[in-house]
Image: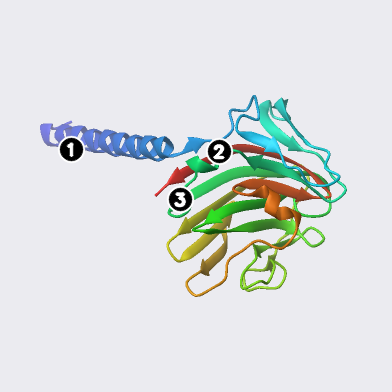
């Protein structure tokens, strides 16, 4: 091997190492921005939401794959959990992410209620018989009626990655790698559907006649 070839190989190795180091640093910086809202062992700042006929929620530290999860019981109507540390929450320029599983039932297994500036709304995942996704409410129309409404198939016992981003004048949401909401909010009326869902404020996760599991709850500011 000539000295020139050796220098080329050495330079290539240094380049590969530099790329790997930069990639690792980028991942570390991204991970550092996220703040966990669930330690896998206790409800912490979460409490079961005081819905009528609720069966409550509990932590299972070794749920299924061995990781901790919050299991929301199947209620006669709504069940869920509410975050009690509202003063810590951003209201704009933030993201919230979680993983959710429909364990049993045929309606929404994740109704994520989150702040949108001075208002709030709910991302419905699997509503109206199990396949409707959308925001409740936009211009006083719920997730089955406004332009964010779409249908998706969901499978019991499967984890779904759910992420919501709220920025000035915009709400975006993803399920796994699919963008399911991209709504410009300027000039729109954003709010909650009338009724018990108000008890999910300032941040909550609810289900409707459905047992669900929630894990990897986290939030970050932009």
Quadrant of the frame with the N terminus: top left
Percent across and percent down for residue 52 are: 83, 47
Q: Which-is-in-front pick, marks 1 and 2?
A: 2
Percent across and percent down for residue 14 are: 22, 33
Vertical placement of residue 56 versus 161, above or below: above
**In the rendering, which numbered label is found on residue 85?**
2
> What count of labels does the image hold?
3
Q: Is residue 158 visible in this depiction of the protein? A: no
Q: How far is disc 1 from disc 2 in space, using C-alphas?
A: 57 Å
Question: Pointer 3: what residue?
Answer: 94
Vertical placement of residue 60 versus 101, above or below: above
Residue placed at 58% from the left, 39% from the top? Answer: 217
Residue placed at 36% from the left, 35% from the top? Answer: 24
Q: How far is disc 3 from disc 2 in space, using C-alphas?
A: 16 Å
Question: Pointer 1: what residue?
Answer: 8
Q: Earlier in the sequence, mark 1 or mark 3?
A: 1
> Is there CB contact under 8 Å for labels 1 and 2?
no
Q: How far is disc 1 from disc 3 in space, using C-alphas?
A: 45 Å
Element marked by disc 3: strand
Using a 10 Å C-alpha cutoff, classify the residue at mark 3 as few (fewer than 14 neighbours), some (14 to 19) or many (20 or more): some
Q: Earlier in the sequence, mark 1 or mark 2?
A: 1
Q: Earlier in the sequence, mark 3 or mark 2?
A: 2
Percent across and percent down for residue 38 are: 59, 32
Which of the pair 215/94 is nearer the observer?
A: 94
Element marked by disc 1: helix
Q: Which-is-in-front pick, marks 3 and 2?
A: 2
Residue placed at 24% from the left, 38% from the top? Answer: 15
């Amino acid at each position: 091997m000539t000295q020139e070839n050796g220098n080329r190989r050495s330079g290539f190795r240094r380049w590969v190492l530099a790329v790997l180091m930069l990639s690792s640093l980028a991942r570390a910086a991204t991970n550092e921005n996220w703040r966990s809202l669930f330690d896998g062992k206790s409800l912490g700042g979460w409490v079961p939401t005081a819905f009528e006929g609720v069966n409550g929620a509990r932590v299972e530290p070794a749920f299924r794959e061995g990781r901790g999860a919050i299991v929301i019981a199947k209620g006669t109507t709504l069940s869920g959990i509410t975050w009690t540390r509202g003063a810590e929450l951003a209201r704009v320029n933030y993201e919230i992410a979680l993983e959710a599983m429909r364990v049993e039932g045929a309606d929404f297994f994740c109704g994520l209620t989150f702040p949108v500036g001075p208002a709030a709304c709910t991302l419905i995942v699997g509503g109206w018989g199990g396949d409707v996704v959308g925001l409740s409410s936009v211009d006083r129309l719920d997730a089955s009626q406004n332009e964010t409404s779409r249908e998706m198939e969901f499978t019991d016992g499967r984890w779904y990655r759910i992420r919501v981003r709220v920025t000035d004048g915009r709400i975006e949401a993803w399920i796994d790698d699919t963008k399911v909401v991209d709504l410009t909010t300027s000039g729109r009326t954003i709010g909650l559907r009338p009724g018990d869902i108000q008890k999910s404020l300032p941040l909550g996760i609810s289900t409707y006649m459905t047992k669900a599991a929630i894990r990897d709850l986290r939030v970050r500011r932009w």
